[in-house]
Amino acid sequence: MPAVTETIETVQSVTEGGYKWGFTTDIETEFAPKGLNEDIIRFISRKKEEPEWLLEWRLKAFAIWQKMEEPRWAAVRYPPINYQDAYYYAAPKTKAKPKSLDEVDPELLRTYEKLGIPLREQAILAGVEGAGEVPAEGRAPVAVDAVFDSVSVATTFKERLEKEGIIFCSISEAVQKHPELVRQYLGSVVPQGDNFFAALNSAVFTDGSFVYIPKGVRCPMELSTYFRINAKSTGQFERTLIIADAGSYVSYLEGCTAPMRDEHQLHAAVVELIALEDATIKYSTVQNWYPGDAEGRGGIYNFVTKRGLCRGARSKISWTQVETGSAITWKYPSCILQGDESVGEFYSVAITNNRQQADTGTKMFHIGRNTRSTIVSKGISAGRGQNTYRGLVRISPKAHGARNFTQCDSLLIGNECGAHTVPYIENRCLTAKVEHEATTSRIAEDQLFYCRQRGLSEEEAVGLIVNGFCREVLKELPMEFAVEAQKLLAISLEGSVG
Amino acid sequence: MNAIAPIDNARGFLRAAEAMPVPAWAEGLRAAGRAALAARGLPNRRVEAFKYTDLAPLAQMTFTRPEGGRAAPALGAPRGRARLLFVDGVLRGDLSTLPVRPLSEVAAVLGELTDPMNQPLAALNAAFAEAGMVLEVPAGEDAGLVELLSIVTDEAGPIAFHPRHVIRLGAGARLTLLESAEGPDHLAYLHNPVFEIALAEGAVLTHVRLQREGRAAFFLSSVHAAIGARATYDNFTLQAGARLARNEIHAALQGPQGACHMNGAQLLGEGQHADTTTSLHHAAPECTSRQTYKTVLRGRARGVFQGKILVSREAQRTDGYQMNQALLLSEEAEMDSKPQLEIYADDVKCSHGATIGALDPDQLFYLRARGIPQEQARAMLVEAFLAEALEGLADPLCRAVLEEALQQWWRQPA
């Protein structure tokens, strides 16, 4: 993926530390009025020309949300959020719907270029994108859905995917073109009233990606969505829905960045995955929202609900996340293992530096027989960061032969940070086996010494050791992403040593 | 975070507490207990620390005040140097060989180690706090083995008793406390002891507890221990009785190079619910902690383990380890486990592990293939499973008592 290479180049070229994706795009934006009420929801629904049932679905979610209390149980601290003081819809102004990339605002294209995300299919295939040093042959292209504030601005490789019967588009488009699929599955894994932030999302969600892989199809390329928050005082509430029909396979990547601002911005997404019989969904995230400055000013509140349903027998859902950004990360990508012999996986690296906070982990619900789950979590705390792994493994009485293995390791860098582990294990089945291990330690002096002795600076040595610590997780990422993730780890830890 | 929502369900207990005569030494303690009960009530599952053990059903129960005095149960030969005996919830000086000291003598330190507002068991005890064991071992002395027994007899009725025990060891002092609680299976009584333990520099306390309350009883217990520099607190708890048992240990390593060992076993059968909740605070550098808890479940039993290790920023070079394992022997059993690490110091070595599963069929097969009958093979494997928790127990007498209790549990029907 040349785009990623370019990102890395960009990263390497900047010698000074800091967040490299913090620029703003000066583009004319259309806002809904500030605040949150039924009229705003009607406005969003009208803007998206949604059918009546979806508007009603949103309004029902809003009614539920109004009765809910904001949860406070997580190990994260933040001042109360004023839900009335934000824009719930912000979209770049366009004259008409662009029919091709040529009609997309060049300013937007430049933004994605700067972020290293290719929106021009030809350019990628010709290998002229980015630094141009990497030959295109032998590299699988990546289809991208680019979401800018509240709308999807472009989706690439659509025609090629359509040939295979794969649907990859924004969720707004899916509502228009495939309403039966959206209606059947939307909210089937994360219902409107699931939790406070999911209810909020269900009421005001704007855009996100929709994927449908037909029976027996192996998606020929990685699918990816790139989320960008640009406008001030907005929240991003995307909704992603991925359905893998029987016997299909898809690998999906998600990336995200935002400008540097003094204010906190809320990102409350909902991601629903459904895997039918023998289907596999691999979902990878490299989360790089703006983390705020060293004093904790600004940054994104990343309060996200992600859940996958392994509905069919032998289905598999694998979550891999690298969480380096956001002022606060609060999410638990989960698997409901309903089909017999279904498999859930969760691989996570979460870094908190400066004043970042993370309370993240997973939930594995074992319902079917012989279901298996693996959890590998690596938490790294530096500066004044607070990092919590929180997870649930629940084995229901009928999950005969269920198996779980959990490994949580925490690394502390500096004496002002914190690392916490809170696993919940509930087993109600005689033939199930659950194992959990957790360790907390710091970087060993002898490891550091060994690296320093070979001429590495302290910062390089820490970067190398941290990468080794995270290897088990990083190797689960698609190769190009893994390279970028490694670089990100090093950048996130800048200034934490020496 | 984890704010305890107001629960108004302790009125019955409050009325009973207010009806009691209040000795001068208990005024402050009882008032604090009542205030906490009124403000917080008996915790239900919405309270995070009681997520798996709901105490709200206790509010429906009607308990009587212990009268005691008449019964003189048959006792075995004393095992140690001295014995303190509770019969039907009343401390019996006449049957004890250890002089009974009134709590008024330690009034100044009473309640020092507890936080009733956030510790519902301690709050309930404080509201009713009555005489318990007061044991002070002067610096440098070895007090040997002391027995603390509680026996509830058939005549007791549905009593509730809340003894408060205070144990203070001077610098370098040593004590082994062997504690045992039992009662008849048909009585729905409540036993809710609180221990306040302070160990000065270099003191060593071995605290072995045997909980074999009747199968209809409620057992709530909390141990609060402050461990000084180079001191050792060694707790082993066997929980085999009661219909609902919650055993809390709150220990704080307050001086450098202290050690805390918390081990235990929960052996549960049909209709039993037992919960072990430990909270260990490493507040000083270079301390060591070890925890091993094993739970074996038969019939429709439910086991709970919650264990938290908190390491403060000052507690550099902490070495903490915790393991909890459960063995399910029936289709209806349930085990809930929540280990927890909260760490603010960087130069530490902390780990925890948890496993839940059934007997290994391969191991069973191995034994059966060698001609060992099914039941005996299962018993052997369960014994082996529990052995690790007993390992740390050096005192041969305590060990023998525990092994005997274990055998007895295995012999009785699930």
Image: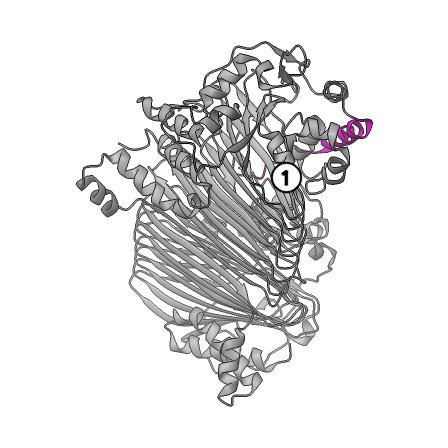
Magenta-span inclusion, residue A284: no
Task: Identify the main secondary structure in magenta.
Answer: helix
Q: Is residue B283 above or below residue A23?
A: below
Q: Is residue A205 above or below residue B292?
A: above
Instruction: State the extent of the magenta-drawn residues as a range.
Output: A51-73
Left or right of residue A372: residue A175: right
Say which chain tag 1 marks: A
Pick whichever, B140 or A328, lies toward us. Answer: A328
Kindly identify the residue that appears in the image at 38 percent across and 37 percent down: A486
Label 1 is placed on what type of residue? Glu
Can see residue B368?
yes
Q: Is residue A358 above or below residue A86?
A: below
Q: Is residue A304 above or below residue A274?
A: above
Q: Residues within 10 Å of mark 1 (few under 14, many from 20)?
A: some
Q: Name the spot of residue B207 as percent of width and height, x first.
A: 43, 66
Left or right of residue B379: residue B68: right
Q: Name the spot of residue B208 as percent of width and height, x first.
A: 45, 68
Q: Name the spot of residue B373 as percent of width and height, x first.
A: 55, 88
Q: In the rendered image, which quarter is residue B153 located in?
A: bottom right
Residue for badge 1:
A164
Pick whichever, B352 or B73, lies toward us. Answer: B352
Q: Name the spot of residue A411 as percent of width and height, x first.
A: 37, 43
Left or right of residue B19: residue A433: left
Pick whichever, A273 or B404, lies toward us. Answer: A273
Pick whichever, B204 or B32, lies toward us. Answer: B204
Can see residue B314?
no
Magenta-span inclusion, residue A63: yes
**Which quadrant is home to the C terminus of chain A?**
top left
Kindly identify the residue that appears in the image at 74 percent across and 18 percent down: A43
